[in-house]
Image (tube, helix red, strand yellow):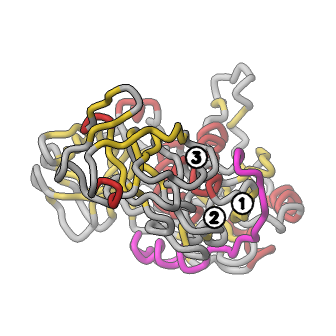
């Protein structure tokens, strides 16, 4: 491995070398969770007409100067075109969402009215002209940006898109990922392992995590501990945005991933991060970018969430920051490595507390089920008192 770099330095390198994703168009109903590539603009003023906001009556204020009764000219429901000219001394029974008749300037809700057969009595001073009228263009002018680019499409964005008739949306293409796991001791999860073998778990974990990250897993393959087989397999998927390896990146006699990748991509941007778990992490920048994660399951989880997940989010123009939480109990450890430790979170009044759940080793991934994510403690200190604020990253 190269000289160790800090987690912060590793993150800076990876986030500065994310791929530029192309744009594709997809139907609105399939766009949830995707990233908008261009702004959504108002195709007309919003609201597009003077919109009535209460069920009641509409009329001209001037018609009340001679009498305090208005005769009903008819109904005006939502969705109907503007009615004919309002006769003097008359009003329209009008519904919420209807367009205001062009010769009316006042709306009064039913709650403030007294009805007598075909007339409504209106008390002087009981209303304000212009109230309960949502004026045309008062929210947004035609051509105004309603949703900026690089916004994640959720239910609110979908509603705006439908309002302006954007039934097809331009979105960033999902990052395409090829995943390779390694290890002759690893067998398929459907197999019955021998005493010296283990079932594959990293692939299942990363299938889920990549989906949550908005990535598209285009290929998965388990490779033997053989450098030539590694080179041949990777050669076919150099058109991906990202290649992820699990295992084979440490200093063991059968760790062939680095020499194989160097034959294809040259020297890594870094190999070795001052952290535990996950010290052997390596990264190659370029097209494609390559993350080589350690093979122990907990190391895979920590390094994916700490580095790969932010990388994929940054490629999609997102920058999710870790949540700051209050440490639930004192932790002491020996530097010089940053320490990532699973935690269980609980809300205590205005703060979220994180109770440490130390694992016996980086292969003890089953115990992480009790946790909600992990906190990273920097190597500059040996002791972290209860209550100190630390960054928390949730499992996906």
Residue 171 position, x and y percent, is: 70, 63
Q: Are marks 1 and 2 in contact (CB under 8 Å)?
A: yes
Query: Does the magenta portion include 23?
Result: yes
Whether residue 21 appears in this view of the structure is yes
Badge 1: how crowded within 10 Å, few (<14), some, or many (20+)? many
Whether residue 314 appears in this view of the structure is no
The Cα–Cα distance between marks 3 and 1, rounded to whole angstroms, is 21 Å
Mark 2 sits on what residue?
36
Q: Are marks 2 and 3 in contact (CB under 8 Å)?
A: no
Q: Name the side, left or right, on which 369 lies relative to 157.
A: left
Mark 1 sits on what residue?
169
Q: In this view, does 53 lie above or below 293?
A: above
Residue at image x 33%, y 58%?
61
Q: Which of 224 and 214 is in front in this view?
A: 214
| Circle nearer the N terminus (1, 2) | 2
The image quadrant that residue 235 belongs to is: bottom right
Q: Name the side, left or right, on which 372 lies relative to 381.
A: right
Which residues fall within the magenta stretch? 1-30
Residue 142 position, x and y percent, is: 59, 73
Secondary structure at badge 3 equals helix
Mark 3 sits on what residue?
212
Residue 56 position, x and y percent, is: 38, 39
Q: Which of 20 and 30 is in front in this view?
A: 30
């Amino acid at each position: 491995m190269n000289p160790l770099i800090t987690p912060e330095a590793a993150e800076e390198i990876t986030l500065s070398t994310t791929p530029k994703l192309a744009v594709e168009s997809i139907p609105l109903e399939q766009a949830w969770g995707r990233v908008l590539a261009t702004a959504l603009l108002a195709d007309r003023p919003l609201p597009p007409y003077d919109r009535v906001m209460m069920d009641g009556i509409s009329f001209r204020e001037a018609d009340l100067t001679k009498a305090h009764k208005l005769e009903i000219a008819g109904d005006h429901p939502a969705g109907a075109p503007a009615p004919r000219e309002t006769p003097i001394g008359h009003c329209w029974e009008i519904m919420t969402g209807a367009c205001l008749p062009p010769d009316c300037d006042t709306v009064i809700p039913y709650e403030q009215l007294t009805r007598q057969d075909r007339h409504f009595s209106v008390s002087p001073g009981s209303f304000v002209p212009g109230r309960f009228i949502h004026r045309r263009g008062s929210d947004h002018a035609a051509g105004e940006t309603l949703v900026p680019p690089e916004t994640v499409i959720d239910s609110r964005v979908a509603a705006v898109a439908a309002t302006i008739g954007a039934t097809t949306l331009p979105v960033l293409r999902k990052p395409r990922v090829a995943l390779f796991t390694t290890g002759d001791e690893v067998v398929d999860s459907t197999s019955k392992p021998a005493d010296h073998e283990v079932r594959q778990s990293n692939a299942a974990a990363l299938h889920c995590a990549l989906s949550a990250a908005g990535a598209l897993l285009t290929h998965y393959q388990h490779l033997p501990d053989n450098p030539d087989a590694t080179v041949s397999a990777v050669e076919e998927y150099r058109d991906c945005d990202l290649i992820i390896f699990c295992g084979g990146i440490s200093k063991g006699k059968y760790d062939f991933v680095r020499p194989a990748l160097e034959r294809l991509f040259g020297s890594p941007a870094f190999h070795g991060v001052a952290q535990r778990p996950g010290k052997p992490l390596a990264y190659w920048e370029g097209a494609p970018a390559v993350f080589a994660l350690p093979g122990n399951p907990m190391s895979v989880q920590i390094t994916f969430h700490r580095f790969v997940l932010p990388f994929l989010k940054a490629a999609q123009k997102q920058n999710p920051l870790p949540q700051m939480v209050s440490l639930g109990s004192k932790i002491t450890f020996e530097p010089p490595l940053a320490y990532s430790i699973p935690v269980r979170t609980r809300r205590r009044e205005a703060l979220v507390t994180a109770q440490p759940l130390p694992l016996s080793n980086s292969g003890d991934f089953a115990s992480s089920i009790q946790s909600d994510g992990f906190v990273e403690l920097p190597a500059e200190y040996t002791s972290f008192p209860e209550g100190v604020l630390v960054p928390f990253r949730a499992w996906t």
